[in-house]
Every structure is written in C-alpha cells, then in structure tokens.
Image (tube, grey):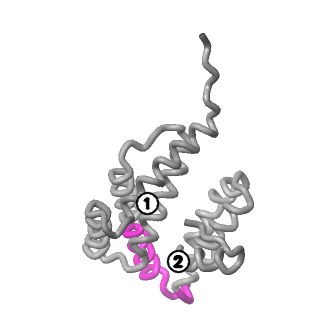
C-alpha cells in the first residue's frame, strides 16, 4: 500500500513547532538548563566585553536562525540547547569582530568619520547589498519585522510593544 507523502510545508511546520516549544521550555525561568544557558551567554559577553548586544536578543536571533535552518534544509534540530549555545556563541563572536573592526576603522580614519553612526552606515552598506535580495523573497510581515529590528534598530521588547500597540497582538 502506498501512503501519501506529508507535504513539506506541513513537515517543516511540525519541526519548527517542536524547536520553538523546546526553546520556550528553556526560556522558562524555573528551568535550570535555561538559566545556565542564559548565564553562559552573559559570562561570554562579559569576558569578550560585548556591551552592544543583549542576551535576550542573542537568544532570539539564534532561535530565528534555527527556524530559518529548518525552512532551508528541512532537517530537525535535535537539541535546541546545543543549537542556541552554538549559534548564540557565534553571534557574540561576530559582534566582537564587528566591534574590533569598528575600533580599527575609527582609529585609522577618525578624521573621516563624523560619528559612530557614520561608520556603522559604511559597514551596513556592504551588508545591505546582500540583504536586499533576501528581503525580496520574504513576506511583507517578515520584511516589516526585520526592518524594525535592523533598520530602525529596535530591541525585541520594543518590537513586541510596537506590534501589541499596532495590531493588539503579541509576536511571541
């Protein structure tokens, strides 16, 4: 007997739901593994002297990367804890690299840069070229969310408040 195949979108939805459920369990304040993960990120940020990144933003970005991974590859993420730890640590390391590049560029071309924002715009121009093609493939709602986060530089808490005020709904 031939069984009908489960549609990919439905399979991906199940995988994403499993992943987000596991992440939500980790984020429960009573979960010792989640507290340990949170403390690990905080300790790593303190060791690397990263001040421009929030632990909650780091976890949220790692979660978004997990969902994007499932969408792209259609594979299950076996351990949300391991995924968040790996991707979050990489995000922190990348932030350290950005801050080092920023400091070096500022020292080298201090006379050219009027402010911190001017340097950030130089770096962002390169990244925007690559991001523009990817943004076109996203839905309008996803584009708005990414615009709020990265263009307007809102924190996830502020975005949640924005959506609640705008649409009377939460994004969590």
Q: Please tell me whether residue 105 belongs to the stretch shown in magenta.
A: yes
For image coordinates 27% across by 70% down, the residue present is 39
Q: Residue 155, how many percent across, how many down?
A: 53, 77
Circle 1 SS class: helix
For image coordinates 72% across by 56% down, the residue present is 139
In front: label 2 or label 1: 1
Query: For this rendering, which residue is in front, 68 or 127?
Result: 68
Say which residue label 1 marks. 24
Which residue range is magenta in the image?
Answer: 95-115
Query: For this rendering, which residue is in front, 102 or 62?
Result: 62
Please state, as top left, top right, bottom left or bottom right, where the C terminus lies in the image. Answer: bottom right
Mark 2 vs 1, N-terminal side: 1
For image coordinates 46% across by 40% down, the residue present is 76
Q: Residues within 10 Å of mark 1 (few under 14, many from 20)?
A: few
Say which residue label 2 marks. 157
Would residue 160 appear left or right of 81 to someone viewing this image? right
Question: Please, is residue 4 above or below residue 95 in the view?
Answer: above
Question: Please, is residue 158 above or below residue 7 in the view?
Answer: below
């Amino acid at each position: 007997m031939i069984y009908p195949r489960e549609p990919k979108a439905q399979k991906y939805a199940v995988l994403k739901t499993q992943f987000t459920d596991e992440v939500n369990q980790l984020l429960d304040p009573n979960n010792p593994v989640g507290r340990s993960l949170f403390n690990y990120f905080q300790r790593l940020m303190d060791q690397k002297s990263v001040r421009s990144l929030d632990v909650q933003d780091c976890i949220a970005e790692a979660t978004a990367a997990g969902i994007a991974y499932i969408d792209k590859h259609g594979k299950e993420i076996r351990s949300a804890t391991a995924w968040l730890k790996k991707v979050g640590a990489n995000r922190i390391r990348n932030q350290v690299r950005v801050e080092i590049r920023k400091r070096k560029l500022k020292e080298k071309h201090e006379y050219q840069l009027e402010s911190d924002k001017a340097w950030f715009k130089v770096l962002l121009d390169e990244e925007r070229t690559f991001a523009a093609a990817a943004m076109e493939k996203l839905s309008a709602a996803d584009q708005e969310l990414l615009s709020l986060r990265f263009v307007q530089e809102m924190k996830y808490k502020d975005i949640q408040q924005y959506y609640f005020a705008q649409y009377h709904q939460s994004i969590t």
